[in-house]
Image: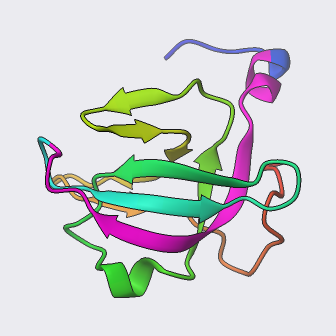
Amino acid sequence: MSEISWEDFQKVELCVGTIVEVDEFPEARRPAWKLTVDFGGSIGVKRASAQITDLYSKDNLVGKQVVGVVNFPKKQIGPFMSECLVTGFVTDDGPVVLAVPDKPVKNGTRLA
């Protein structure tokens, strides 16, 4: 594992947002949801593709707060343009567990 400097870490804007909409993504190579995430204030609403269908249904995602990288460049994923990266942890057997705050946080709050 290589070390990074504090300045390197500060370049990554990891912020809290609330999932406000979840859509099917049938064109995805691997099962995924299209997420609309409200990061609040100056960041606004961003869209992301997330391969989290194994553990999360549409119903249990709407209203959930997540941690996302909001300063990556946009990325084309098939017919979908992803604007942020919703973070999670890949388990030993493959599914992704979302990185979430354990208490409510104001949308847009940056990871400290």
Quadrant of residue 32 in the image?
bottom left
Span colored in magenta: 8-28
Relative height, residue 75 to residue 89 (above, below): above
Residue at 13% from the left image edge and 46% from the top image edge: 30
Residue 82 in magenta stretch: no
Residue in the foreground of this view, choosing between 1 and 69: 69
Q: Position of residue 92 (x, y in %)?
A: 20, 52
Residue in the foreground of this view, choosing between 78 and 107: 78
- From the viewer's perspective, is 30 left or right of 41? left
Q: How is the image coloured?
A: rainbow
Residue in the foreground of this view, choosing between 98 and 80: 80
Residue 87 appears anywhere in the view: no
Residue at 60% from the left image edge and 51% from the top image edge: 46
Residue at the bottom extreme?
Answer: 59
Residue 108 appears anywhere in the view: yes
Q: Position of residue 93 (x, y in %)?
A: 14, 55
Residue at 75% from the left image edge and 80% from the top image edge: 104
Relative height, residue 23 to residue 84 (above, below): below
Q: Position of residue 56 (x, y in %)?
A: 31, 75
Relative height, residue 71 to residue 40 (above, below): above
Relative height, residue 58 to residue 111 (above, below): below
Quadrant of residue 12 in the image?
top right
Quadrant of residue 109 in the image?
bottom right
Q: Position of residue 42 (x, y in %)?
A: 87, 49
- From the viewer's perspective, is 3 left or right of 42? left
